[in-house]
Amino acid sequence: MKLLVGLGNIGAKYEKTRHNIGFEVIDALAEKYGLDPWKSEKKFFGSIRRGQIGREKILFLKPETYMNLSGKAVSAVTSFYKLRPSDMWVFFDDVDLEFGTIRFREKGSSGGHNGIKSLIQGIGSDQFPRIKIGIANSDREKIPTDRFVLQKFSSEEKKQLPVIIDETIQKFLIHSHVDELS
């Protein structure tokens, strides 16, 4: 079983903000494979979506703890299903990468991202694959980081998001090999 985690903040106030690109990626990936609908599960402190890609069982998680406490939800799921860090993939925004840049990493530090910090603390390891999606633009240096990440994308950026999300999904499929199990 693979756990796919999209990082973001819950609530209408945060929908379509830069910080929620992780939610948007796993929503699109789950739709691509026609997985079960989202279901909020209190024991996991998040919304869950279950399904299969090829022969691989997949569990999607959107933590409902807000970004900075994402580790609470991830820890609950990984403990319950006895998953190793390497069974988990995380999708999240990166304010230090230019908008649209997509980076895959097999493991590593939080890089200053509070959601990843919480996740590493929650599971006690930084040995999990992740895909970072760049959200920086020319306004990045003019606005404090905490305000910048909670901004909505510009109209021009919104036009590019479907391609960026699709490229992120393709990068996941290439590196995870889950689609090769069909």
Image (cartoon, rainbow, N blue to C red):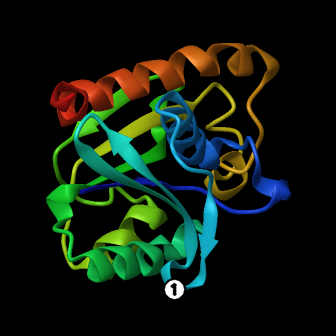
Horizontal placement of 100 versus 158: left or right?
left
Q: Quadrant of residue 67?
A: bottom right
Q: Which residue is mark 1?
A: 43
Quadrant assignment for the C terminus: top left
Q: Please name the amino acid that badge 1 sits on.
A: Lys
Q: Classify 108 as above or below 31.
A: below
Write the residue at 48% across / 32% down. 134
Nearest the camera: 8 or 34?
Answer: 34
Quadrant assignment for the N terminus: bottom left
Q: Classify 49 as above or below 34.
A: below
Q: Position of residue 166 (x, y in %)?
A: 48, 20
Q: Position of residue 78 (x, y in %)?
A: 29, 74
Write the residue at 73% across / 53% down. 147
Q: Position of residue 59 (x, y in %)?
A: 39, 57
Q: Classify 94 as above or below 97.
A: below
Q: Quadrant of residue 154?
A: top right
Write the residue at 59% across / 56% down. 8
At label 1, counting other C-alpha atoms closer than 10 Å, the crowd grade (few under 14, some 14-19, many 20 or more) is few
**Could you tell me which secondary element the residue under label 1 belongs to?**
helix
Nearest the camera: 53 or 94?
Answer: 53
Q: Is residue 127 visible?
A: no
Q: Quadrant of residue 52?
A: top left
Looking at this rendering, what residue extends furthest in the right direction?
Answer: 13
Q: Is residue 87 visible?
A: yes
Q: Position of residue 46 (x, y in %)?
A: 57, 71
Looking at this rendering, what residue extends furthest in the bottom direction?
Answer: 43
Write the residue at 77% across / 38% down. 152
Nearest the camera: 58 or 138?
Answer: 58
Horizontal placement of 19 versus 165: left or right?
right
Q: Classify 85 as above or below 7.
A: below
